[in-house]
Image (cartoon, rainbow, N blue to C red):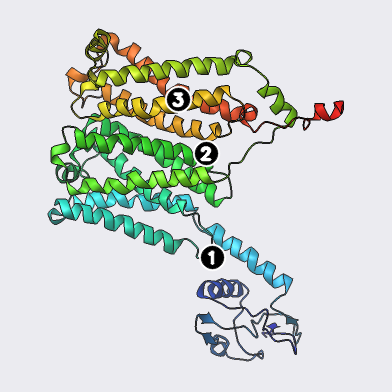
Amino acid sequence: MRRCLCLQPQPGRGLRKRSLQLNFETYNLIAGVLEHHHCFITDQKVKSDTPLKLLLPLHRTGEGYGPLTCLFTLPISTFSWDRFYLNSFCFKKHIRSSKNMVTGMRPPVEVSVFLLSLLGPGVLFTMNKIPGLQEPLPILGMGMFVLGSVLLLLILTVQPKTKVDPLFYVFAEFTINCMVGLTNALEQDGFISGFMDFYLKMGEPHLGTAYAVMMSYWEVVHVILLLTVIHRMFTGKSYRSLALLWAGSSIANEIVVIPGVVIGKYGSNIRPAFWRNVPFFLVPFWAASQLFRRPKQMPVVTADKIAAEQKKSLLSRPADLLLSLLLLGAMAFFVFRGFVVLDCPLDACFTYIYQYEPYLKDPVGFPRIMMLVYFFYAVPLVGILLYGLNIPGCSWMLDWTIFFAGAMAQTQWCHIGASLHSRTSFTYRAPADKRWPVITLNVLLAIVPALLALRCRTNPAYFMKPVPKGQTNDDKKKN
């Protein structure tokens, strides 16, 4: 025989202050808990022989289900009745543990985002089979529709009561773009087919160049970074540094590609789909500004260690001395190659572009833009980083070195790969007898910023705010 366990308000107190307003999500959660114990929701005190159909209704209010006055029945010992209240610790604990169990059954957010990102290649494959969607304007419209639909799905699938960082939606949208880029790289190199044919003809023809193929392969790194950031975001871990690494890489990517298309040989064949790159160009700047404004998590370092590190001269810090020399060499190389692409008449520039890096005069325009970006932006930034490496207390070094490392890794990967790729005309590929010196120099340009960022992260005492006199433990002991 079934007996009832009721949950009612305490006599005379009512539920004015602690009334439980149920939305559909909460109702389904409680119903699931009760169903597990063969229980039913009711709005009245019930008897053991009450028909099942009378145990289901709940009063409705404007925004969901109203305050509960009685809750459920349980199969307990014969004729034993107890009262439980809505503020019961046992009930709240039961609901909380059940909610965690339900949440644990859902796939992790990063897995959901990855599965959602597969819509990109799927849409491309579908459009490649439908001629009506292969015109310039429908291509642009479909791209915007997919991005908007994914954003709406993300907003609907993330729990409404969960406080979500707005950057999550940025990272999720860029994950889709990365999967589209990776699809392009695999098709251009012959690993897959049937996805990008129409898009290269009527969308963005420049994606068939060697530089764009290497840029598309780099999207693998972006996907890993983005999914890791999303994972850390929803597990309560710090993700600021990884996000800055992605921001530097993404900004460097777009700041070379968009001007390169406009001034290169594809500038006379720009289709409407090209303008979908504009939000992907602007949003990383916004994301980077948000990340830089957020407080950084500084490691715990004793005041004595900070004071001791900041008293050392550059000669007493051999690793910093070596990094300073390497950065100076990188600056000189940036300036030299800037002169080369600006058609400097010096013999050294003429010899270099024809005998060492003929790829710099490839008419696609990407290498020329990259060298100018280095000349006008990387040179001043490296100068600032040199200042921070030699003046103690520059805590901003911890952020900007990561940002710069991401930018240099992306651009150098594309530059080295494109100068060797079979899609680059043989005339502009690196000569076989000069290949390894050129590759070595370009690899160093990618490695040195990474080493600098690693040095700042592993031993940050020199870059932390100076300790006022009299605040170290040694000074206190002397006083």
Give the image location of residue 112, x and y in percent: 44, 53
Of pointers 3 and 1, the one earlier in the residue sequence: 1
Residue closest to the eye, 385 or 479: 479
Picture residue at 22% right of the left edge, 24% below the top: 422
The residue under label 1 is: 161
Give the image location of residue 253, x and y in percent: 34, 36
> Given contact means CB atoms under 8 Å apart, are the residues at marks 3 and 1 in contact?
no
Neighbour tally class for label 2: few under 14, some 14-19, many 20 plus, Cα within 10 Å: many
Q: Amino acid type of disc 2?
A: Ser
Q: Quadrant of the N terminus?
A: bottom right
Residue closest to the eye, 452 or 101: 452
Give the image location of residue 382, x and y in percent: 45, 25
Q: Is residue 190 visible?
A: no
Rendered image quadrant of residue 388: top right
Q: Is residue 76 visible?
A: yes
Please say if 187 is above or below 38: above
**How many angstroms separate mark 2 from mark 3 (CA)?**
19 Å
Left or right of 21: which side holds 349?
A: left
Neighbour tally class for label 1: few under 14, some 14-19, many 20 plus, Cα within 10 Å: few
The residue under label 3 is: 382
Picture residue at 37% right of the left edge, 51% below the top: 173
**Tag of residue 241:** 2
